Amino acid sequence: MNIGYDLINFGSTQAEGTTQLTIGGGFRTRLVKNVDVGVAYEAGVVDPVGIFEGRVTADLIWRF
């Protein structure tokens, strides 16, 4: 379970007074014994949508 908006968020000078609320989903799968890959999509759900309308995030986990 991922709690929080981002691990690190440096903010934005263009975000002052903006509300950001998103909903998203994604998946992660194991490709081989020590490599996982995942992808997620988030969409803004308030009007106006805030800083972004939607975003795709991808990750690759390599265990050694």
Image (cartoon, rainbow, N blue to C red):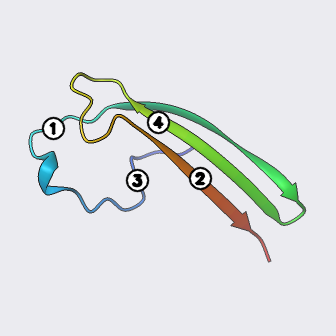
**Secondary structure beneath disc 4?**
strand
| In this rendering, position of residue 56 left or right of residue 36 | left
Tell me: residue 35, above or below residue 43. Answer: below
Check contact, mark 1 vs mark 3: CB within 8 A.
no
Q: Nearer the viewer, residue 52 or 11?
A: 52
Query: How far apart in space, not on screen, are marks 4 and 1 (Cα)?
Result: 17 Å
* Disc number placed over residue 26 in the picture, else none: none
Check contact, mark 4 vs mark 3: CB within 8 A.
no
Please count the marks in the image. 4
| Residue drawn at 62 percent across, 37 percent down | 26
Instruction: Identify the residue under disc 1.
Output: 18
**Secondary structure beneath disc 3?**
loop
Q: Quadrant of the N terminus?
A: top right
In terms of sequence position, does the residue under pointer 4 or pointer 2 come before the other? 4
Instruction: Identify the residue under disc 4.
Output: 42
In terms of sequence position, does the residue under pointer 3 or pointer 2 come before the other? 3
Q: Residues within 10 Å of mark 3 (few under 14, many from 20)?
A: few
Instruction: Identify the residue under disc 3.
Output: 6
Query: How far apart in space, not on screen, are marks 1 and 2 (Cα)?
Result: 26 Å
| In this rendering, position of residue 8 left or right of residue 62 | left
Instruction: Identify the residue under disc 2.
Output: 58
Q: Amino acid at mark 4?
A: Glu
